[in-house]
Image: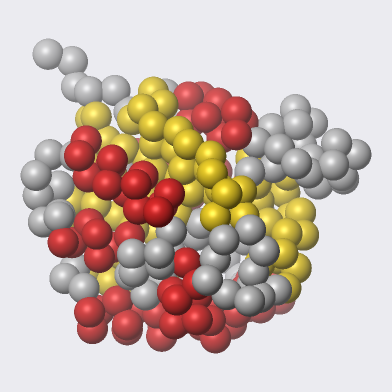
Amino acid sequence: MAETKQDVAEHEMWEDLNIEYENAYQNNPYKKTCVARAIELLPAGSRVLDIGCGTGVPVSKMLADAGLDVVGTDVAPKMVELAKSRIKGTFEVADTVEYEPRGRFGAVFIIYSHLGLSYSAFHSAVVRFVKALQPGGLMVIGQSIADDVPANAPEWDSTKSYVDGFNLPFMGEPFATLMFTREGQKKYLRDLGMEIVYDTVDVFQPASEKSDPETQQYVIGQVPHASK
């Protein structure tokens, strides 16, 4: 799939941010609590996939420190090199839209790494990731919610479940963002056959003068266990 100008601009943005983004977002207690809950739900030593892993801090690091077998992908080469240099795991440069998981996973983490995608690109990727989950596997998603987006905004889908390409401030700049409502995100996972086993919404202030407080949702969906 050929890159669009928007794709190139987004890739360059993440490449330029690297440590600045890590410093702003690494000490997010709501993100860490969600990841810790996922770790509790996973069998020891599970193989897990961190999509859009960035520098690996804090998500991949928490997973590796818990003894899990971590595979991480990110579109930004500098971020991947930082993850490789500091965290035990397998990290590679890959675009979420095109990445094909190899093997099966106990969990897939998509923590704020899909917001620049269109709904169709996101859905196509998630369907692939769900197929890579083991029975009882987890889909862990972090996002900004669309509940406060004006009802007349043209980016809403017909069901008012999500906005596609809504300009949301990110690190001081407008960023065309995919956001579900809180209930829309849970319904999306349920429609893929998952049970919601964790869901929280809180307001987080990134550690950056460029950033405003963000209303964030962290949700875990679980696919059915194998029949006995």
Residue 27 is left or right of residue 162, and the answer is left
Where residue 93 sits: x, y (%)?
A: 38, 75
Where residue 48 sits: x, y (%)?
A: 24, 52
Residue 158 is left or right of residue 20, and the answer is right
Residue at 76% x, 37% y: name it: 157
Determine if residue 68 is in view: yes
Residue 152 is left or right of residue 25, and the answer is right
Determine if residue 128 is in view: no
* Residue 116 lies in quadrant: bottom right
Vertical relation: 20 (above or below) 138: below
Comparing 188 with 202, the one in front is 202
- Name the quadrant of the C terminus: top left
Residue at 75% x, 31% y: name it: 160
Comparing 218 with 221, the one in front is 218
Where residue 128 sits: x, y (%)?
A: 41, 45
Residue at 36% x, 44% y: name it: 34
Visual colour scheme: secondary structure
Name of the residue lying farthest toward the top? 228
Total labels drawn: 0
Vertical relation: 123 (above or below) 48: above
Where residue 202 sits: x, y (%)?
A: 54, 44
Vertical relation: 219 (above or below) 166: above
- Name the quadrant of the N terminus: bottom right
Residue at 45% x, 54% y: name it: 111
Comparing 156 with 4, the one in front is 156
